[in-house]
Image (spheres, rainbow, N blue to C red):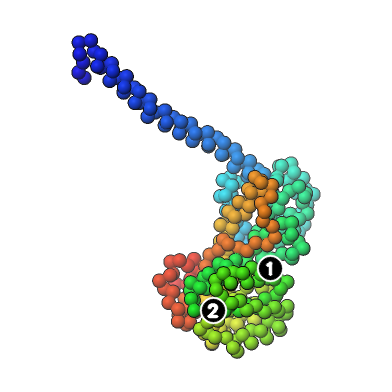
Amino acid sequence: MRTNDNGAPCMMISQRGAEAKDRLVAPLLSVTLLFFTALAVASPARAADADSIVVIYPDISEPYRGIFTKIIGGIEEKLGARVTTYPVRQDTDIAALKSSLLSQNAKVVIALGRQGMKTAAALDNRIRVVVGGILTVPENEVRKQTVISLSPDPALLFSRVKTLMPAVKRVFVIYDPDINGWLIKLAREAARAQGLELVAHEAQDMRSAVRFYQEFFSSADSRSDALWLPQDQTTVEESSILPLVLQESWNKNIAVFSSSSGHVRRGALFALYPDNAALGVSLGELAQDILANGYHGKRGMLPLRDVQISVNLRTAQHLGLDLGHQQQSFDAVFPEP
């Protein structure tokens, strides 16, 4: 390095270099400090959430146990930590469970399945409850709770209908109001939003359901009408009604879509069904909202929005639909390759 006789330029360059270095290092130190401070704050918060939230689920055998395991995995993914879980049966000691939850300082219970919901309803009313993994609940049981149903949101179903079958104008559904009355209310709004006409018939017994199906198939237009099969043990009874409906729809080239993936395996065009891990994430988010805000503003039955799609390509071909280019967007395809 060059200098004059007394070395002054050398000193000036060193000072300027040091000042420049300080200007570069100081912001980096600030960012690093903020990063580690955020970690120190965030980790205890996640741990606190996991300690304050517990999961109650039915103590049942496979394959149903695996479904609840996936939901719990999604909950833990959202909370960022393991959660305490309680498998429950009809003979579970409610008093002992309540004592255990209070000693753990549990604030929110995520109850899975009907047995989980039934058990949670008997707990201390200071513990908030979020319910998932259940099809439907009578209105008088659900007013003070939040229940994410296993019934796919009609808005998602009808959106798929318009994507796969743009020519469809009317959607028919036959339902038991005691099971799916709440869902049909949502379906009417969803149909209007998609420019569809929803034609819904109430049937509280199988005989009435069969009569409505006969009327539908006698007058349906295969170019513009489609039939929706909700999860309904009355109107979509699987041993007698479902085979007749699927056979008649095949004979008359009527598109049938469903809220149950098992129906696609048997010949329905497509169905939306639960993404169990994603459902767990949503349940964990609701529980966190309760912890953070005390009241999350969502009560009653909520339709399932964490869904996957299955499609029957053989049925699609029979209906004249070319879905081959969309196969990568389907989560399950039938017949299986």
Secondary structure category for the residue under label 2: loop
What is the three-letter code of the residue carrying label 1? Trp
Look at mark 2 in the image and give the residue it sits on: 169
User: Crowding near pointer 2: few (<14 within 10 Å), some, many (20+)?
Assistant: some
Exactly how many numbered labels are in the figure? 2
- Name the residue rendered at 52%, 73% in the picture: 161
Q: Is residue 169 left or right of residue 147?
A: left
- Name the residue rendered at 31%, 23% in the picture: 17
What is the three-letter code of the residue carrying label 2? Lys
Look at mark 1 in the image and give the residue it sits on: 182
> Marks 1 and 2: CB-CB under 8 Å?
no
Return the residue nearer the eye: 326 or 55: 326
Is residue 102 depicted above or below 157 in this figure? above
Observer able to see residue 59:
no
Quarter where residue 197 is shown: bottom right
Is residue 86 depicted above or below 143 in this figure? above
Residue situated furthest top in the rendering:
6
Return the residue nearer the eye: 270 or 71: 270
Task: Please tell me the numbered disc located at residue 160.
Answer: none
Is residue 289 depicted above or below 324 in this figure? above
Observer able to see residue 22:
yes
Q: Residue 44: horizontal and vertical position, in percent?
A: 59, 38
Q: Nearer the viewer, mark 1 or mark 2?
A: 2
